[in-house]
Amino acid sequence: RATQGLAYVIAGTYQGKPEIFLYKAHIGADGAIRSFGEPWRNLENALVQPPKFVVEDDLAILRGLWLERSRSYIGGFRLNGSGGAAIMDKMIATGRAFVSSTAQFASSSEPRALQLAAARPGRIHWHTLSDTRIQPILQTEPPAALLLTTTEPCWYLD
């Protein structure tokens, strides 16, 4: 039984756009992630010769993240369009996708994987900025902890 695996952490960044960060994680006997290790950034090499902790389900996700990466790739991956939404589906299906409010992820309690939930209604509210411009803001009922508005469809995360 594997003792290590790949974890996907969706986190807000200083730019205000959520990104995906990869972590090498410790897995319990039941297959659930028990704790997070160091950030893992060896994605390109893993696509050629996957390490033991990268399983077949991960390879499809890693290929998608690599293809969707921006030219300014530094360590996190952004999700865009319908391809980004498909990657979200795959990450959640692994049971190893998590959400954090910041990219400096550190979990002091037992991690809780994201799970699919029912659709949540959302509305666009128009917010007037100080320079008289108007900015659209997507709000869900009840409010979501993190919104991915760059995917089609949009995702909310709690």
Image (tube, rainbow, N blue to C red):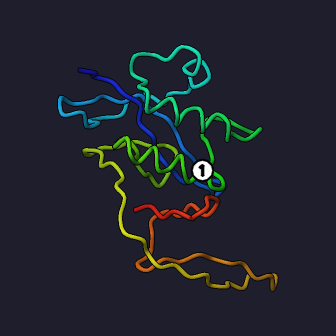
Judged from the image, the secondary structure of the residue bearing numbered disc 1 is: helix
- For the N terminus, the image quarter is top left
The quarter of the picture where residue 137 lies is bottom right
Residue at the outermost left position: 29
Please state the horizontal and vertical placement of residue 89, each as a whole percent of the image.
Answer: 47, 50
Please state the horizontal and vertical placement of residue 22, each as a whole percent of the image.
Answer: 49, 35
The quarter of the picture where residue 28 lies is top left
In the depicted structure, whether residue 149 falls above or below residue 62: below
Q: Between residue 57 and residue 33, name the one nearer to us.
A: 57
Give, as a three-letter code, the residue at label 1: Gly
Q: Is residue 103 left or right of residue 125?
A: left
Q: Between residue 121 and residue 141, name the one nearer to us.
A: 121
Residue at the outermost top position: 49
Please state the horizontal and vertical placement of residue 93, each as a whole percent of the image.
Answer: 38, 46
Q: Residue shown at 58%/48% (left/top)?
A: 19
Q: Residue shown at 36%/52% (left/top)?
A: 114
Mark 1 closeness class: few <14, some 14–19, many ≥20 residues within 10 Å: many
Can you identify the residue that label 1 sits on? 84
Q: In the rendered picture of this protein, how many numbered marks are placed on residues?
A: 1
Q: Is residue 19 left or right of residue 95?
A: right
In the depicted structure, whether residue 34 falls above or below residue 84: above
- For the C terminus, the image quarter is bottom left
Q: Residue shown at 45%/69% (left/top)?
A: 144
Please state the horizontal and vertical placement of residue 130, each as a whole percent of the image.
Answer: 76, 82
Q: Is residue 28 left or right of residue 130?
A: left
Q: Is residue 51 left or right of residue 80?
A: left
The quarter of the picture where residue 76 lies is top right
In the depicted structure, whether residue 5 falls above or below residue 16: above
